[in-house]
């Protein structure tokens, strides 16, 4: 049977803004997402259910873009409901490869809801028996000056193997990169097998975060809707992101993102501890 040539291949790539952070960083060009993200970050947006709705909408959009760009594709032959009257009623073309093995990681607390959203979408798209959700519980560690020095693990519920799996770590705010780097390192080194690919899905990232991830984990794909470098000098802000990376700054003295969004984990959970 002939394949419809229009759907024999896919050249889809995520639309990106121009930057100089390297080929594994993807800053998604999506004005609708920027609109919703600005609303999520706004001073007037103070709690549930609005915060939850906005985070869900943003991660549903991100999942659709990232999964279309990064998940393996394959040939499918799907008879439609018209096949009983017309033998030609079979869609033959490209779709996501259903046999893809994936694990999405919920990093408590801000990453719990985004991971659940990824998990739900993956179960719709792939063979659900090959989709897993892991859970990590960690927090920043700081010194006496309030500066972030790393991340401490409190508990984890993790499957034993990652061999040939795509590992997805959705976490809204990429600030210092310490927690994300700790999680990535665990999946790179501490479990059985080797991941096929690792991806970090963030709503906002800083130049400092990107430096941590790209230096410590150069093969990891980082996706984000926005780069926040609001404490950079005015002339640096006028340049293409990453062109003067060493002069860019997105974290204040307490390692909070500027412009940022405030405590997304706190707002999502109504828990201010």
Image (cartoon, helix red, strand yellow):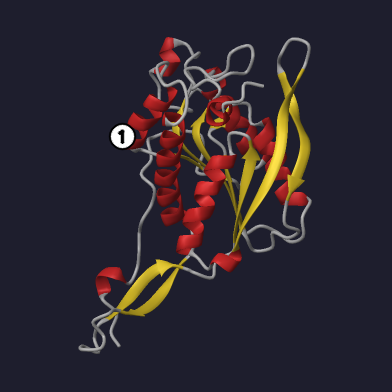
Count of numbered tags = 1
Q: Closer to the camera, 222 or 127?
A: 127
In the rendered image, residue 56, in percent from the top left (x then y), is placed at 44, 40
Residue at 56% in and 46% down: 115
Position of 89 relative to 192 (above/below): below
Say left or right for 104 vs 87.
Answer: right
60 or 226: nearer the viewer? 60
Depth order, front residue of 90/109 = 109
Please rate how many residues cluster around mark 1, counting C-alpha atoms within 10 Å: few if below 14, some from 14 to 19, many from 20: few
248 with respect to 152 (left or right): left
**Residue 200 shows in the view:** no
Image height check: is 184 above or below 270?
below
Residue 271 lies in what quarter of the image? top right
Residue 273 in which image quadrant: top right
Q: Position of residue 66 (x, y in %)?
A: 45, 50
| Image quadrant in which the N terminus is located | bottom left
Judge from the rendering whether residue 164 lies leftward or rightward of residue 249; answer left or right.
right
**In the rendering, at what x and y percent does residue 131 appear?**
58, 61
Q: What residue do we see at 45% from left, 49% from top?
A: 63
Q: Nearer the viewer, residue 11 or 146?
A: 146
Residue identified by numbered label 1: 31
Looking at the image, can residue 79 be seen?
A: yes
Q: Residue at x 45, y 16 (%)?
A: 236
Disc 1 is placed on an element classified as helix
What residue is at 38 percent from the left and 52 percent from the top? 13
Direction left: furthest residue: 85
Q: Position of residue 156 (x, y in %)?
A: 75, 45
């Amino acid at each position: 049977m002939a394949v419809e040539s229009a759907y024999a291949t896919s050249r889809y790539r995520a639309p990106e803004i121009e930057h100089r952070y390297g080929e594994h960083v993807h800053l998604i060009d999506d004005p609708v997402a920027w609109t919703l993200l600005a609303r999520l970050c706004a001073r007037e947006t103070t709690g549930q259910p609005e915060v939850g709705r906005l985070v869900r909408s943003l991660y549903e959009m991100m999942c659709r873009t990232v999964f279309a760009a990064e998940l393996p594709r394959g040939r499918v032959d799907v008879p439609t409901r018209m096949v009983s009257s017309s033998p030609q009623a079979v869609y033959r073309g490209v779709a996501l490869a259903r046999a893809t093995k994936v694990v999405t990681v919920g990093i408590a607390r801000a990453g719990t809801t985004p991971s659940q959203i990824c998990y739900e979408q993956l179960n719709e798209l792939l063979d659900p028996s090959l989709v897993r959700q892991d859970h990590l519980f960690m927090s920043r560690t700081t010194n006496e000056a309030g500066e972030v020095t790393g991340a401490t693990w409190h508990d984890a519920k993790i499957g034993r193997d990652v061999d040939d799996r795509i590992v997805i770590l959705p976490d809204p705010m990429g600030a210092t990169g310490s927690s994300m780097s700790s999680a990535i390192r665990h999946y790179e080194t501490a479990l059985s097998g080797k991941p096929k690919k690792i991806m970090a899905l963030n709503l906002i990232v800083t130049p400092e975060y990107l430096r941590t991830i790209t230096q410590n984990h150069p093969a990891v794909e980082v996706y984000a809707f926005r780069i926040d470098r609001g404490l950079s000098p005015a002339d640096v802000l006028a340049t293409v992101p990453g062109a003067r990376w060493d002069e860019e700054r997105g974290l204040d003295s307490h390692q909070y993102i500027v412009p940022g969004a405030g405590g997304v984990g706190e707002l999502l959970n109504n828990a201010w501890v």
